[in-house]
Each structure stands twice: as structure tokens, then as C-alpha cells.
Amino acid sequence: MLILDLPLDNFQNFIFILVRVGAIVFSVPFLEARNVPMTLKAGLAVAVSIMLLPQLDLPAFSLVAHPFALALGIAGEAAVGLIIGLTVQLLFSAVQLAGQIAGFQMGFAIANVVDPASSLQIPILSQFLNLFALMIFFSINAHYYFIKALVDAFELIPPMGVAFDGRLFDIIVRMGGNMFVVAVKVSAPIIVAMLLTQTALGLTARTVPQMQIFIVAMPLQIILGLTFLGFSLPYIKPFLSDAFKDLGRTIIEMIRLFH
């Protein structure tokens, strides 16, 4: 039987690490899905915390006699973890929004599927692009950048070192605005193609009023939309790759505002 013989100060550091890592594990989009077992998330958080503890040079202190300070420290670690998870969540939300915009333009607005992460009905193109982005995320080893950013975050902000800066909210607002920019850039080829298609159909309806334009428009929009989606995927891949590689720098930029 394995017994963890940790001094009290190291055990407190382990609790702080566990709270921060646990908040990240339970908030990142590829692990927060409801179909991922809770025991798997908890086990992953504990395993990562155990691996990080000997790798980090954290200060030793005891807060047993100060329960209020201990509670504030734990709340600060949870806030840091949730904000780190939020940065990843916003990027994947931008991809889902791009699919929703493209699907609406193509006429797929009523074709929804169940998102396993939120158990909500989302457009089918949103789910496709979300899975495509997730595949790119792991194929370029972006999770390594994410883990490195997590380690750097502990070096920048040790336990009990969290102090909120007002500029943090400015970065969060900027990231929220950037989500719409990413969504429009990803869905831009389909938006332009559908705009030209609808313009051509409108001119056709004016010149050939005998044609049942609504019967022709729906399958034509779907065919052209899927065609341009296929053409745009090779260009979406490097764009998302750069966005995921910048994710670590964005996290570090936010973390610097915590102290």
C-alpha cells in the first residue's frame, strides 16, 4: 500500500495545486463534457497534481491556524484555474459560432444535434467544426503548450500569491470580442459563397419568374455550402493551428495580471 508521507506545508501546496488543476480540468471544453466520467476527471486532476508537486519550487508555509486565509487562497486558485479554462473555452466557442453562422446561411439552422459537452441542441456544422478543431488541437500537440503554460503559471503565481488586476477584465472582454472575429474568419468562405448564390438566385427569380426558385435554392445552397466548406478546410487548419499555438502566450499574459 502506497502511503504519501508529506509534511503539512507540502500537503497544503498539494491542495492548492489540486484546486487549480481541478478547476482547469472541469472547465476545458474537451474534458467538461457530461459523458466524461466524473471519476476520470478527478483522477486526472489528482494525477497531474502529484506529478507537478515535485517539479515546482513552491514556498513552504502553514495556514492551519488561519482558516480564513486558507479559504481565500483556495478561492484564488480556483479563480485562476477557471480563467485559464475560459481562454480555451472561448476559442472552441468561436469555432462553434462559425459553424452556426455557416449553417444558418446554408439552411441547416433546423438541423441540430446534441452536443455531448453541454447536452444542448447545436447546429450540425457547429459540431463538425468543433470536432475538426479538437482534432487539430491534439494533432499539433497544443495540449503540451497548455501544460507548459500551466507550469509557468505556478512559477509566476505561487499559492497565496493571487492578486486580481483590473486589466484582467479588459483582456477577457478583448478575448470575447476576438471570439466573433475568429468565427467570422472561419465561416467567411461560406458566407461569401452564400451571399453570391442568393444574389444570383434573386436575379434569376426576377428574370425567370416562372421558375420555382425556392425549390431550387435549398438544395443548391446546401451543395455549394458543403463544397466551399470542403475547399476551405485546408486553409482553416493553419489558421486554427496558429490560434492554438498563441493560446499559451495568451494564458501567460493573463496570468501576469494576477500578481
Image (cartoon, rainbow, N blue to C red):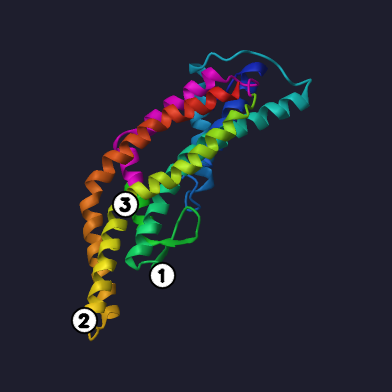
Q: What separation in Å lies between label 3 and label 1 (alpha carbons)? A: 21 Å
Q: Which residue is mark 2?
A: 208
Within the magenta stretch, is there residue 138? yes
In the picture, the disc for residue 206 is: none
Q: Quadrant of the N terminus?
A: top right
Q: Looking at the image, which is closer to me, 64 or 119?
A: 119
Within the magenta stretch, is there residue 210? no
Amino acid type, mark 1: Ile
Q: Nearer the viewer, mark 3 or mark 1?
A: 3
Amino acid type, mark 3: Ala
At a point 38% along the width and 64% down the height, the residue shown is 104
Q: Position of residue 7 (x, y in %)?
A: 64, 16
In the picture, the disc for residue 188 is: 3
At a point 26% along the width and 78% down the height, the residue shown is 206
Is label 3 in a helix, a strand or a loop?
Answer: helix
Say whether residue 84 is left or right of residue 219.
Answer: right
Q: Nearer the viewer, mark 2 or mark 3?
A: 2
Amino acid type, mark 2: Val
- Residue extending furthest front? 207
Using the image, determine if residue 47 lies above or below residue 182: above
Q: Quadrant of the C terminus?
A: top right
